[in-house]
Amino acid sequence: MDPRIHSLQSHPPLSISSTKRTPAKNGNASFNSVLQQELSEIKISKHAKLRMKERNLYISETEWVKMEERIREAKQKGVTDSLILMKDKALVVSTKNNTVITAMNKQEAKSQIFTNINGTIVMED
């Protein structure tokens, strides 16, 4: 057999997993709205999950929604890594990746020096 000719391997067809999407009210979501919805979800790193569990930190659904809005605003202003100060906790978030990097209670945050951030979001209400 000619060394330039390679036998093709059979691969199973790609399967596309279905994800929960909320259709637009008219039934036809625009590409941009679907893209924004997919990009807006905040993820939590393994490290942050561990810290939240160790420190007994809880973030309510309304706090997540507000945080998501504020992260979107910060991203529009060019912020890539942010410190989010809440009433009783502080989070370091990669706004570029929509990922919570670490979390701590407010007392702990007072004794920290935060580096490698280029924006702060204050959500103390």
Image (spheres, rainbow, N blue to C red):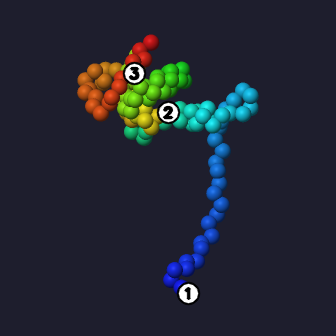
Per the rendering, the mark at residue 42 is 2
The amino acid type of the residue labelled 3 equals Ile
The amino acid type of the residue labelled 2 equals Ile
SS under mark 3: strand
Q: Which residue is drawn at 48% across and 27% down?
A: 72
SS under mark 2: loop
SS under mark 1: loop
Judge from the rendering whether residue 53 lies leftward or rightward of residue 39; answer left or right.
left
Q: Do the residues labelled 2 and 1 touch (CB within 8 Å)?
A: no
Q: Earlier in the sequence, mark 3 or mark 2?
A: 2
Tell me which corner region of the image, top left, top right, bottom left or bottom right, holds residue 116.
top left
Q: Residues within 10 Å of mark 2 (few under 14, many from 20)?
A: some
CA separation, marks 2 and 1? 53 Å
Q: Residue at x 55, y 87 (%)?
A: 1
Percent coordinates x, y for residue 20 in the rendering: 65, 37
**For residue 117, above or below residue 3:** above
CA separation, marks 1 and 3? 64 Å
Q: How crowded is mark 3: few (under 14 residues within 10 Å), some or many (20 or more)?
A: some
Q: Earlier in the sequence, mark 2 or mark 1?
A: 1
Percent coordinates x, y for residue 68 in the rendering: 50, 26
Q: Mark 3 points at which residue?
A: 121
Percent coordinates x, y for residue 86 in the rendering: 40, 19
How many marks overall?
A: 3
Q: Name the residue under label 1.
A: 1
Percent coordinates x, y for residue 28 in the rendering: 72, 33
Whether residue 90 is visible to the viewer of this picture, yes or no, is no
Q: Quadrant of the C terminus?
A: top left
